[in-house]
Image (tube, rainbow, N blue to C red):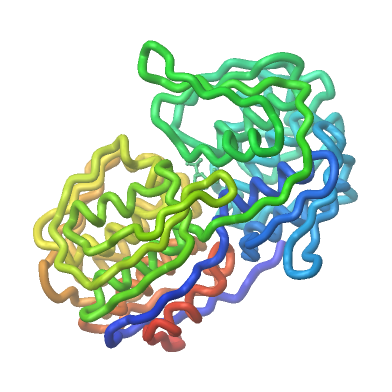
Amino acid sequence: MSIVKPIPKFSRPAGPLHGTVTVPGDKSISHRALLFGALATGTTRIHGLLEAEDVVNTAKSVTALGAPAAKVDGHWQVKGRGVGGLSKPAGPLDFGNSGTGVRLMMGVLAGHDFPVEMIGDASLSRRPMGRVLNPLKEMGLDVLGEGGDKLPLTVRGSANLLPFEYELPVPSAQVKSAILLAGLHAAGETTVIEKEATRDHTERMLRFFGAEVAAKPDSDGRTRITVTGNATLQGREVRVPADPSSAAFLVAAAVIVPGSDVTIEGVLVNPTRTGFYDTLREMGADVTLENQRDEGGEPVADIRARHSKLKGVTVPPERAPSMIDEYPMLACLAAFATGETVMQGLAELRVKESDRLAATAAGLEANGVKTLIEGDTLIVTGTGGPVAGGGTVETHMDHRIAMAFLTMGLATEMPVTVDDTAIIATSFPEFIGLMESLGAEFGDAG
Ligand code: S3P
């Protein structure tokens, strides 16, 4: 486990941001392309894979499990071993900062009868794993040693996994995906029931690889997602669209910096991921989706954002899964809006890379913005005009906290400092460079 030295930086009020750019590939789709490629027969070629630390750790893990993933002639290739065909790694698998990497891999390992030690950084080692391990244990996964809810953990799967039916107690695509991945290895049908729709990239991509996956509404308005076990996946050519969660920072910057006009090309606009953009439009932001098209089984569009006056809104709890990673940025935007922005149903933010509810509120308060946390609701009182800034934000090893506050600092009266920007490399290493190419300014702090 490597310890990276923190790199503090500040952002300062910038002139108008202008330009047309692309952001790197979607993180969720990148993890899945590597994992499903490892479980397929034949070679999977991945174009536009996100080359950030989280995804590179997944690539290293599948390689250690006998399915080599490497960059060849400008794109990534995975040599698949077939469902249930991976082999025992020589040492522990290190997932760094990535909840998606480790939790989806638990589903994969559930179908393999050998022990694997799974480790991660300090942030990942604080996050709950029981939400994935408990249903997987019902299917036949063993957690060895003292076990528990947190990494480090050693798991041992089974070659005789049982099919399972499970209603998600929390709206989590990671939990859903882990169970569906285990279900590929089981003898029979495995069903996950979800009350609130979460991102559906696993369902879409498993079908693309040739698995049988059905999603049907039930009479209570829930969705039943069923995968047929003893599956065979076929290696494919995958194109990864640009990540809407990374694009969100550039869009937000354009909305708050006066005179800006920015376009981000080829962004994933799957409706399970676009809650942030819907909310921005409700707040009065000039954000449009242009040139909508389909690429590799996912909808994409160019997103154009221009400086806008914002008004506070209420964001209902049922929208949370479709913008779960965007709340820190939205809360920072809300500081510039007139009136209160009320964000409801944020319990899941407590178990992200940091306690994002607390980290977001603390960062805003440090920069002169009034906030209130009531249960799982966050209320931000906007100024409708200038926002003070001038504070230092603790990132708590959370890339999205770092990027949200650096973005906010482009439009505050005084610079905003974040105590660590090294962590941004887990999801969006190009963040600072891309922002600078649009006209943003950053400096070294500390
Ligand atoms: C992800 C699901 C979400 C999200 C994470 C990526 C995925 O987590 O926050 O960044 O790729 O499935 P939860 O499933 O915990 O909500």
How many numbered circles does the render carry? 0
Horizontal arrangement in the rendering, residue 29 relative to residue 351 (left or right): right
- Residue 117 against residue 51 in the figure, above or below: above
The quadrant in which the N terminus is found is: bottom right
Q: Residue at x 22, y 64 (%)?
A: 286
The quadrant in which the C terminus is found is: bottom left
Horizontal arrangement in the rendering, residue 260 relative to residue 245 (left or right): left
Observer able to see residue 375: no
Image quadrant of residue 55?
A: bottom right
Q: Residue at x 49, y 63 (%)?
A: 399
Q: Residue at x 31, y 35 (%)?
A: 318
- Residue 424 against residue 188 in the figure, above or below: below
Residue 97: give x, y in percent of width and height.
60, 56
Q: Residue at x 56, y 49 (%)?
A: 28
Image quadrant of residue 221?
A: top left
Residue 259: give x, y in percent of width and height.
22, 81
Nearest the camera: 224 or 179?
A: 224
Q: Residue furthest top?
A: 219
Image quadrant of residue 284?
A: bottom left
- Residue 194 against residue 78 in the figure, above or below: above
- Residue 300 against residue 336 in the figure, above or below: above
Residue 109: give x, y in percent of width and height.
76, 35
Residue 258: give x, y in percent of width and height.
21, 79
Nearest the camera: 207 or 357?
A: 207
Observer able to see residue 149: yes
